Image (tube, coloured by chain):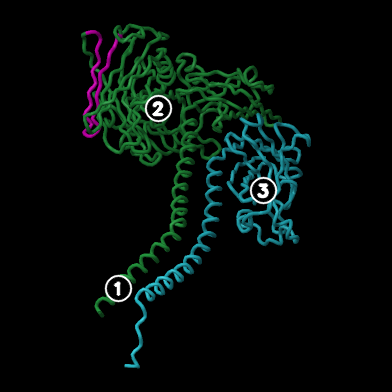
Chain colours: A cyan, B green
Amino acid sequence: MNNLRKPISPVLSAVILAATIIAIGVIVLMWISGHSSMVIRQSQIDLVRSEHAAKENLVIVHASYSGGNITIYVINTGYTKVFLGPIRVPELRTNTDYADIFTPEAIWFREYVVYKNNSNADKDKALVISMPLGALPEYLENLEIRSPEDISPNEDIRNQMKAYRVDPYTESNCFYKIVIPNVLLEAGKTYSIEIWTLIPIYSKLYMCKLYTTQLVT
Amino acid sequence: MKHRIKIKKGIAGLVAGLIAAIALLVIALPVMMQYQQHITESYQIEEYATMLKELKEIEEKGLASCYDSSTGTISINNTLGENVIIVLAYASDGENEEIKYFQSGKIIAPGINRISITNDLGISLDPSRIKILKLVTSRGTIIQPPYCSKVVIVISEIALNVVLGLLGKEQAPGGLQSFQGEIYAHGFIYPRDNGTHILIHGTTVPDPTPTVEGHGDYPIAFKLDIKTEQGNIKYTLIRYELGDYVIIVYSPLPTIEPDNGGCYNGVCYEVKSTGDHTIYSFGYSYVSKYSDNDEGPLKYTLINNGYNYIIVGVELDNLEENKNFHYNGTIYVSRTADVSESDIVIKFSMDESNDEVNASMYMGDNVIDTKAFYRKQVKDKVSSQFGVYVPVENLLNIIPGTVLWVKAEVTYCSSGSECITDEGDWISFTYNPLKLIVDLIYRKYFGS
């Protein structure tokens, strides 16, 4: 009789059981939630980016080459601001350098400038924004950069990007002129021009949309 | 006693499980909701992007243009039925370039517009030396008018509602060239040949089962897809509209077969050829589409000139449906904008489920035999169109340049008993038959 143990109260056992299930559930869900919040954040970035890309309506009017400069006229016929990021002319790539990549104020590789209307004056340059980089691997892949160190040995530089702000013509009452200076192109050849727009999300600049055009010299 | 303890344990376990399940649900719900929101928004964004793309495509297709370098004039035929605004113009002679921005925009009204690049656009380059000309609309569409050929000038002078596609001497230095590619036309067309050359002219009708490739399952009415052997000159025009008018002279002779798809009470043909062609003359008149802005089944009233007749018709607003339609309607063609005094009244009906078509034309109490044409809707691609052949010159004894009034109304009955009638406005249309230019071209290549 003494060997018999007193049974635990059914209520107590139920409480222990519920607590155990909840504790395990919470741990599992916290892990899922942590993972999910990362996925959700990324999906929110993708959503904002897709939405912006859908609403963007930048028109490349014409690209021409004269006096060693490439000139590209663009107009923003959408209703949202467009941020011009890196420009590529893939045919200019050589094995030894990145002569095909141009960025605002030469933050990476070579420089290009954006003016309002047909001006060439510094006072008429479009506004430049500077922000930390979002998703470096996307930049590396899309611009065909082999290694981050190729951008700059300085980590601060390669983690930063700049963009020219191009306002809708309905707000700014103007079109824009992109000038890529000091480029040597061969006569009678067709070059492709790739213009990447960027989008600031959570104070970082992500790649948004690719516009392409052709230039016949 | 044991039994009661077991019941208590069971109930307690059940309660515990319930509490745990609720707790899990409360934690998981926001995550699931966020995922759901992501999916929904992604779809909405995709739809929005598709809509913008389609709007641009419609604008591109609805603006036919050409540039006459001898006068420095751009002719634009706006068949969209609404104003289009030009915000930017770019011109280059190969050495110098000019770009002009228009703060308040230049309006391109429905119908033919003639724009002087000097006076209207403010471009100071020598018009005869301009090689590149681009106009940008407020929607972001780029219009790049090709050079107008002599044919275009003649036709646009005679028939004011026409702007044509072309292959002019400026685009084909050295004259007419040999092109490789495809020529296809279907509809109420007249083929005439002299053994080596063929002249094809007439009203095009989309073929429900085209034997050429177009854009998916679209019913094609006309296709010209050609390029020179070197590939330096390319020209592509693919049309899906009912009521366009085509004039083309080329060799060698094509395959011609009767094909009454989309045609009622008249013989239609399918003309097709592939390979090497020499094109001597080409003109194309887009059917004018006048938008009906109110709610209802009538989307556009369609009008175009023919050889010595006009085509009047309707386009229905039915892309969201996924079934065959039954509709009927009335079209008034008159010299006065008054239903009670209308010269010609056309009654028509269409049952798309069995292609049962009826079209009757009345002048007072007289019933006149007529021909009708139709395009059945293809879901998410093209909506239903119905057109009627009206030999106005014979019936009304009118001369070119006479102003006619056209009004259309459509009644659409859904699968239930409910019917909706939609009435369009009176539209003023100038009768400019194409017979003068067709006969001129015929005499040029085939003699009298």
The alpha-carbon separation of the residues under discs 3 and 2 comes to 54 Å
Residue B120, x across and y down, in percent: 62, 18
**Drawn side of residue B67 relative to residue A113, left or right:** left
Above or below, B348 relative to B353: above
Which quadrant is the N terminus of chain B positioned in? bottom left
Looking at the rendered structure, the secondary structure element under dot 1 is: helix
The alpha-carbon separation of the residues under discs 1 and 2 comes to 100 Å
Residue A71, x across and y down, in percent: 70, 38
Q: Are marks 3 and 2 in contact (CB under 8 Å)?
A: no
What amino acid is labelled 2 in the image? Answer: His
Residue corresponding to mark 1: B8
Q: Circle 3 marks a residue in which chain?
A: A
Residue corresponding to mark 3: A86
Q: Which range is magenta?
A: B342-364
What amino acid is labelled 1 in the image? Answer: Lys
User: In this orientation, which residue lies closer to the viewer: B230 or B329?
Assistant: B329
**Drawn side of residue B235 relative to residue B319, left or right:** right
**Drawn side of residue B319 relative to residue B46, left or right:** left
Q: Quadrant of residue B256?
A: top left
Is residue B347 part of the magenta span, yes or no?
A: yes
Categorize mark 2 by other alpha carbons within 10 Å: few (<14), some (14-19), many (20+). Answer: some
User: In this orientation, which residue lies closer to the viewer: B226 or A46?
Assistant: A46
Which label lies toward us, 3 or 2? 3
Above or below, B398 relative to A3: above
Mark 1 and mark 2 lie on one chain; the one further toward the N terminus is 1
Residue pictured at 50% horizontal, 65% vertical: A30
What amino acid is labelled 3 in the image? Answer: Pro
